[in-house]
Image (cartoon, grey):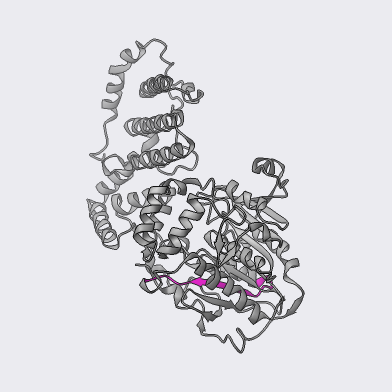
Amino acid sequence: MASPFTIPDEFVQGFFKSGQNLMQAFAGAPRAGHASTGNMDVPKSLPQLQAHYWQQQMALWMGMMANAAGQAGEPVAAPARGDRRFHADEWRNNAWYNLLKQTYLLNARLLGDMVEAADLDPRAKQKARFFARQFIDSMSPANFAATNPDAIKLAFESKGESVKAGLANLLEDLKRGRISITDETAFEVGRNVAVSKGSVVFENSLFQLIQYVPLTEQVAQRPLVIVPPCINKFYILDLQPDNSFVRFACEQGQTVFVVSWCNPDAELAKTTWDDYVEQGAMKAIEIAKAISGADKVNAVGWCVGGTIVSSAVAVLRARGDKSLASLTLLTTMLDFRTPGDLGVFIDEQGVSQREQAIGQGGIYPGAELGFVFQTLRANDLIWPYVVDNYLKGKSPDAFDLLYWNGDSTNLPGPMYCWYLRNMYLENNLCVPNRLTMCDTSVDLGRIDMPSYVLATQDDHIVPWRAAYRTTQLVGGKSQFVLGASGHIAGVINPASKNKRSYWIDGALRDDSEHWLESAQAVPGSWWTHWMKWLKPQGGKQVPARKRLGNAKHKPIEPAPGRYVKARAD
């Protein structure tokens, strides 16, 4: 039985045939099925763009007419590789949907080309580019019930039950205040995520310090202190045993300490950036060193956690403290001159408004920041769930990484505003002695220990070229590594799965492109490369301690602790 939503082929063929003579009347119209116009160089002026666009439209219509007459041809506009919006057969085999898809793609290309042709300064163009992409993504015909063939077919086959379920999902998400992107009932922190064994051995109002049980008889004398981002929960580093960075480090003979940041509420509304540096990262280094009895520690920072720990190390070195043996920075920016798409949300007016509202005290809600991150990859983290949840009435699958992604964390207003102004807006950290933190002048050049700087190729939060500039700022010898994939998947790339690849050993000069041209590609995970680099920094091998903590810092509660379980919503 044919679906009542399917347009008869006879109508489509007649429609195309009726317009064929008109289209052929256009002088210079491309031959039917010929798609070379889609491969022409992008014009530079608006009149050229218009002419190029109509030329492509004519090619599209001629191709559709040829297809209706049984003459197969190449599409004028095709989705980019990896675009999952148009996988249904109807987008290729049904003439109406094929026309709809290609028209949308041509319109999207026109809008993108118009932005590129506009005479704008770089910052304005970046904003125009970003918001044009948001509009383009939102207007995909796959996002609407009336023009999504899968949704229409499912509604017909389920006798409307998918529509009913979709409305129920929509109402539930409206109550929740966010789009459901995973089955949240499938996970529980401490039960099937964040399950590595350990204990909280220290806590203050800002963080808990977790020490993990060693998994080898011998361990490196110097422990590993990991400072994750405070804008997310730490357990991205310890999702499940087969993809746990924490477990991998323990299996490699490391004594691992991890900072578990609190989820700020009104009691911490006046917390500052200096508090995160001194009472957070510096305190964690101090406690880990005291518990281990080592002369130094090796520190790891990820994203804003890397910015915090780098600030802490610069302060410590300015004070003559030599507590750090090495510093590992994972997808971290220290030079914010090209912050990627996040920069479109930050300008003087916006930062000033934030400062007036919460700069002296208040809370920036984690859910708001989480949505900003979702917009950076709307076609992965917004629109597929709109389609599946609401148009098709499906429930999202269980996925540990997306569960973590939805477990948002608030930020104290003073800390957040200071970070926006001094990093993203004014880019002060990379200028020696421009900033004072914890009553100490900060110069990143004082970071004179070996550093391992990891960036990821498709990072939408920390562009890899921005992360590369860290190698030119710190004073010690740097090892720069470029991993495949993005901000999260590029970091959480378990060695046991041997997936993806990374690049190493390029020439460390000012130019990141020269580094890339001279670098070597290596298959597999960067984890193994990092561990080989880290082991010489760990000191001699010593027997693993059977008990966690020490006489002064006794275990408080089992890992993952209670701080990580406090939800922002």
* Residue 239 appears in view: no
Residue 37 included in the magenta stretch of the image: no
Residue 406's spot in the image, x, y percent?
40, 62
Q: Residue furthest bottom?
A: 551
Quadrant occupied by the N terminus: top left
The residue nearer to you, when weighing 562 against 153, is 562
Quadrant occupied by the C terminus: bottom left
**Quadrant of residue 63 within the rendered picture:** top left
Residue 269's spot in the image, x, y percent?
39, 69
**Residue at point 65% right, 40% down?**
513
Residue 136 falls left or right of residue 240: left
Say if 196 sits above or below 347 in the image: below
Residue 89's spot in the image, x, y percent?
39, 39
**Quadrant of residue 14 within the rendered picture:** top left
Residue 169 falls left or right of residue 482: left
The residue nearer to you, when weighing 210 against 249, is 210
**Residue at point 39% right, 58% down?**
355
Q: Which residues are magenta?
A: 251-265
**Residue at point 29% right, 54% down?**
393
Say if 137 sits above or below 413 in the image: above
The residue nearer to you, when weighing 210 against 526, is 210
Count numbered badges in the picture.
Answer: 0
Residue 93's spot in the image, x, y percent?
38, 34
* Residue 366 appears in view: yes
